[in-house]
Image (spheres, rainbow, N blue to C red):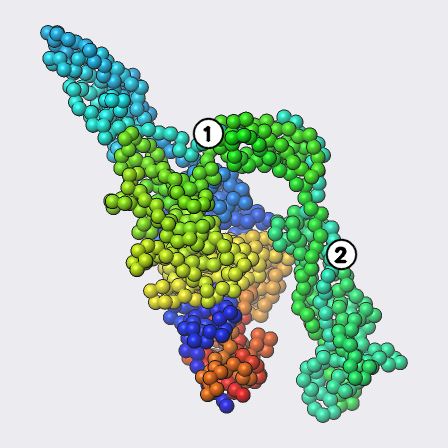
Amino acid sequence: MSLKIYKQSIGGGEISPSMYSRITDPSYSAGLAKCRNMIVEPQGPVVRRPGFSMVRETKYPDRKCRLIPFTFSATQTMILEFGHHYVRFHTNGSTLMNGNVPYEVATDYDESELFDIDYAQSVDIITLVHCSHPPRELRRYGALDWRLVDITFNTSLTPPTGVTATQHILQSATYKDGYVRKYVVTSCNLDNSEESKASQAASVTCNPYGDGAYNTITWNTVAGADHYRVYRDKGGIYGYIGETRTNSIDDDNIAPDSSITPPIYDDVFLTSGGITGATVTAQGSGYVGPNGEITGIDLLETQTWVVEGSGRNFYGPVAPGNCSAWQSDDGWALNFYGDGVGLVPNDEMISLFSASVEIYDAEGSGVGATAKAIFSSASEWIKLTKPTGNLNFCLYGFRPIKGIQVISAGAGYKRPLCRVTITSWPTWTWSRKALNYKFEFKRYTGEFVTSAKSAGFLETSIRVTDTTGSGAVLEPVISGGKLTNVIVKNPGAGYSNPTATLYSNYGSGAQISLTVANAGDYPGCVSYFEQRRWFAGSRMRPQYIWATKTGTETDMGYSLPSQSTDRIKVRVASQDSNRIRHIVPLSQLLMLTASGEWRVSPVNSDAITPESMSVRPQSYVGSSQTKPVLINNTMIFASARGGHLRELGYSYQAGGYITSDVCLRAAHLFDHHEVVDIAYAKAPYSIFWCVNDIGKLISFTYVPEQQVGAFAQHETQGNFESCAVVPESNEDILYVVTKRKIGENTVRFVERMNEYIIDKDEDYLFMDCAGTYSGPAKTEISGISWLNGMKVSILADGYCVPDQVVQNGKITLRRAASKVHIGLPYNSDIQTLPLALQLQDLSFGSNHRKNISGVAVRMIDSASILAGSSFDDLYQQPTRGRETPGTPPKKRNGEFEVDIAASWTDDGQVCIRQSAPLPLKISSITVTCDVV
């Protein structure tokens, strides 16, 4: 039974193998088994993802860095590269330079702290917070004038000095005293957004009720003040009596307004009893130990190869198959389909095997170790299967590698692993009469990974004990086998008489003394909402919320009695003590912890005030440390456990905010992994980009109002480590940090994704870490030293040029070109889901064999493709049609057939690949299928 099956949409993206039996699910008809390096458009087609151009190598190739977006306006955007103790700036694919070097701002953020930094932008200022550092502002004063400053949560105005109060009363008054009046004065700026602390009180003995009595209050001028406010004591509270731009005011028994009082300022992010210093009083000795060097590699498994042959015997062509080996007086020989076909290869033949060995750290940050493979000899063949029937015949396999030799031990390895890959192997031919065969070793088992041994580490820790305090974290600094310094990572709180002890598996004798004082307890998240800057989640007060006074960004003042514009300081009462990780401003303010989601809203007014603030739980899912992103009026965040992305939005039916898992149909992309960075692009497509902990980039095309949600995974020659999006021109552009192996060196790059909308063929860029030459036509393209030793794809004036290896930072073209793109190649793959058919036996095609004999693909502005029933058996569509010689192939629009080899399979899947640096866009697929 031959059928033509039309897949009208492939806009469902990649779905999990766990969904393969859910053929009635709406996503199945439009879903894909694989969608790799392709982007799903909201309308249904899949389009090849643009490549990445290299912007600049990061400052430290052995350290991670993080990208943070800066958007001042639609025309002024930057990508901030936060690295170990520095910030660099990139825009429109270029780096902000100071002469011949990148412009930098120094910071004290360690590499390990970068992805825990939270930020919020207001015009030219980015607020940066981290629990180990005071809140800071990165301020832009000019293109090459960025300043990182600590925030002072106080007023910049000083209170007036020299305040005096003098009574004026008629001489005829009988009683001139009997009362004591006290006054304080504050200084204010022009718009009353800042008001100083109260001055020292001035008192006067007077009779305010006498004939003609009034008091004159005077003070000295304050620099920067526009006017002054005067308060008088009444019942222990200073109430407002007036304000003036002069240096004096008369109080003719004005009734104080006790609802308006002078502001009170305190050190909002300081706690008492913290450890502020640690002094080494005795350095000790013997603190010397290993540093994670590789000491050996256990070859617990190997890669087994068998001999495979194909050719022609007396009866005609024979299909590829495994050979058997038999033993004769002359030694071992090969037997294939009953024909004797030659002798087993000797040691010279076996020496043609080669292998690459990579040592990497699965948990730590080990680097520098190298190793090589030790190969077997031909005499070390091993049996794969025991003989059956004729005992002279059995299938033999060979394990080329019998051991791994460590060349360089490296350092820093916590859980080292060794990846071994056979890179070349021998082939040979044999002919006798009508017998013609071609033989090669074929991989019987895949690339394998084995364990390596680490020497371990010098382990040191400092324990702080005290009867009252808690929370302090101290880090020892060891140099030359001695304790030379102690870094206070977290001061803790409540300590009265703490002692510190250094514990180590090597050495002894060190002693430490501690200093206790008021210490910093800094927030871990920040945002803006209702004209206030909000902070939350310090280490010692994990569920506290702070907000500045209304209309200010740094004023943490409050009044007694409190006023509606006062700063806010609230502790969230919850069942656990998980730290507030994120503050998210939607129509209402939301807070995320590791165990739940909370809504901050007013009780009886439209604005949040100290009196009206209410905090209510909305759900109990929990968020990871990764910063959430917003789309329309909803939020996407990474869950605290499980690695999935979740959506949070308001539901009128529920009367609050609810969450849902958006990854259920593509759970295999997220299970057992952690999302470390998320970015959102609005144009030209609504796409979330996220990077996970194994270096994969995942795109999520999401248009909730149209019920569109589709995932795709993206790979490159290396790992993705961070991502950020900023608008540039008419598109939102994705920037990434990549970690690549260039030759023998590990290098990290900041890279920029090319635009989606391209007008000219020569502007296509479908390669990674790419560079572009644009100028007079020439054949030698230089200046690409960052790709030395790498095999690269080349697009010259719109032509696809054969790949080359970059030597000495250059390549040579056969024909001169004026626009040349050079970069690392990547494959863009899609694979259809197992066929589901409406058959009379109601099986939907399950347990039926299927033969795909033809594929028709509807393409839009695309180049030729490869297609087949598997990625190991792909057939090239003709690359050219009737184009004029000397011109690039025309882009294809319409439905095109691809001739493939018929193949009977259980699933009836079709694989399509684009490996050339050319565009691809597919809107539908039609397959011709036979079913039995």
Q: Who's the residue at 67% across and 84% down the image? A: 319
Out of 388 and 780, give the one closest to the viewer.
388
**Displayed quadrant of residue 154:** top left
Tell me if residue 437 comes above or below residue 31 in the rendering. Answer: below
Residue 756: percent from left, percent from top: 42, 64
Identify the secondary structure beneath mark 1.
strand
Residue on which the image places disc 1: 272
Q: CA distance from mark 2 to mark 1?
A: 57 Å
Is there any visible trace of residue 769 in the rendered image?
A: no
Identify the secondary structure beneath mark 2.
strand
Residue 603: percent from left, percent from top: 27, 45
Task: State the residue lying farthest toward the right.
Answer: 329
748 sits left or right of 663 in the view: right
Disc nearer the start of the sequence (2/1)? 1
Q: Who's the residue at 58% across and 64% down the image? A: 792
Residue on which the image places disc 2: 405
The amino acid marked with disc number 1 is Ser
Residue 612: percent from left, percent from top: 28, 41
Task: State the residue lying farthest toward the front.
Answer: 575
Please rate how many residues cluster around mark 2, counting C-alpha atoms within 10 Å: few if below 14, some from 14 to 19, many from 20: some
**Displayed quadrant of residue 706:** bottom left
Q: Who's the residue at 31% across and 51% down the image? A: 587
